[in-house]
Amino acid sequence: MIPLAYHRASSADEAIHLAGAPGARLLGGGTNLIDLMRKGVEQVSDLVDVTALSSSIEESDDGGLMIGAAARNSAVAAHPLVRSRYPLLSRAILAGASAQIRNMATVGGNLMQRTRCVYFNDAAGSRCNKRAPGSGCDARGGFNRYHAILGASPHCVATNPSDMSVALAALDARIHVSSASGTRIIALGDFHRLPGERPDIETVLEPSEIITAIEIPPSAVAANSTYRKVRDRASYAFALVSVAAGLTLRDGVVEDVRIGFGGVAPKPWRALRAEAALRGQPATESAFMAAAATELADAVPLSGNGFKIDLAQRTLAAVLTELSGDRR
Amino acid sequence: MAIRINGAEVQAPGDARVSLLDFLREHLHLTGTKVGCNQGACGACTVIIDGERVLSCLTLAAQADGRSVTTIEGLSADGALNPLQVAFIEHDGFQCGYCTPGQICAATAMLQEIERGMPSYVTADLAAERATLTAQEIRERMSGNLCRCGAHNGIVEAIMQVATERAA
Ligand SMILES: Cc1cc2nc3c(=O)[nH]c(=O)nc-3n(C[C@H](O)[C@H](O)[C@H](O)COP(=O)(O)OP(=O)(O)OC[C@H]3O[C@@H](n4cnc5c(N)ncnc54)[C@H](O)[C@@H]3O)c2cc1C
Ligand code: FES
Ligand code: FES
């Protein structure tokens, strides 16, 4: 039984100071952290509630958006500017979890949420290199339907479960972080790490740093965008495969395109190869399928998830076809 | 500070580990709120904090300090059933009743979300000021509340009836 202290930070500086204590952790909505503490995956002595820090959602000077890390997921999804300018972000958030959880979850907590790999979450009975480095991985030879086909390592095949982050990856979002020594900005694509030999280190965020805001640059291609999530039941389930995409066409030819995949990799997967393959190509289903195949060329299936390669390819082609609409 | 629970001020527990769910049930004996999975996966523990539906199993009582919590016990006055509760009975929106308090709390807040213009994953037009309430919309918006007895069809009908009556 670990005694627990609860603090409510009223400023970023106070949060940084309080979170510096050994055993201290930041608390957003708690929808992931409290569950993991109860399961014995996370050991915490001090919780620093950061939900009173900035939750504002405002247009930035360059016409993009600045979202405070304490903004609730539902508030972001419902915001008029997000709905009109970044529909893929609104839809990605709305595709995640349930209304109750979206009301609780913060943007900062969503970015930092940990994998749903059942072996990671089973502290008592399973081996997991992410939870206990060097102990082994029970997922590789076990139930790995939800696991990665891209970016995994011999040490870890877990996926990042966030829907929101897939849309943010496609949008080139930037994460604003603060520590006692100052502030810095991290591109979303650089924020989450691939597992390599250290699956326990999931992001480049230092233990002394906190996320204060997410900045989304203005994006013309986001105006025609969406998010599609394929899962084992119609709602309230994690993605097998998901696609966030934005597309602009000129005379039936792809002018600009942004693509993110979810459910297939240890991090929100920006499909830069597929994007490069598509620019300047005719907006046809065969071109979409070929671009997806280029992105998935390095995919490595596990015993239980080979279907994801075809599923990812077809889902991307279907989403881009939908976005082509009658503009083709 | 204190937690306002169904209108009454209550001192938050001294032990920060106590969940709002355990605080309601074990400390205050408000047993209407139910324990299902205790890990965010079923919705049985749904309560309303400052107007928003949330899961009390993943909320620490300490997080609710200074806020206003409404449980199923606070949704009707003097033992009289509210229109949603009546509609659940009329449409067979339950069998064993275990998920029902969570369903009613969730539906209560969901109807307000729709009035505020909250979209859902199945809302076709995100720019629309208000989503048209279809059975599909209700299913998506209520997907955070599971029912082991499979009373979902009745639940959707009950909510639809109340929403239609309110709009009239
Ligand atoms: C049943 C269930 C189903 C779910 N389904 C989905 C789904 O389909 N799709 C999906 O995307 N998600 C899903 N989720 C996960 C959910 O989206 C996350 O739990 C949530 O976004 C986490 O946000 P939070 O604010 O509650 O984080 P918390 O649990 O409070 O914190 C999570 C982590 O973030 C850290 N943190 C919090 N704030 C900051 C900050 N400002 N700076 C640095 N670190 C910080 C915490 O220390 C902790 O390590 C589901 C969750 C549950 C329980
Ligand atoms: S008991 Fe809270 S969601 Fe199941
Ligand atoms: S009525 Fe029995 S669980 Fe829903």
Image (cartoon, coloured by chain):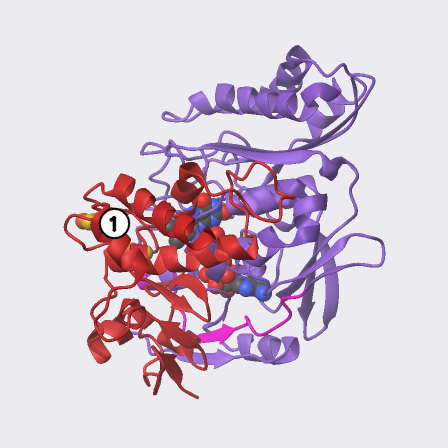
Chain colours: A purple, B red
Question: Mark 1 = which residue?
Answer: A125
Residue B25 seen in this snapshot: yes
Q: Which residues are magenta?
A: A36-56
B109 or A79: nearer the viewer: B109
Label 1: how many residues lie within 10 Å, few (<14), some (14-19) or many (20+)?
few
Q: Residue at x 67, y 35 (%)?
A: A225
B16 or A190: nearer the viewer: B16
| Residue A105 in the figure: left or right of residue B97 | right
Of the residues shown, which amino acid type is indicated by label 1? Gly
Picture quarter with ligand 2: bottom left
On-image quarter of the C terminus of chain A: top right
Residue A46 in the magenta stretch? The answer is: yes
Instruction: Say what secondary structure mark 1 lies in.
Output: loop
> Which percent across, then down, holds residue A110?
53, 54
> Which percent across, then down, holds residue A246?
69, 33
Q: Residue at x 44, y 76 (%)?
A: A46
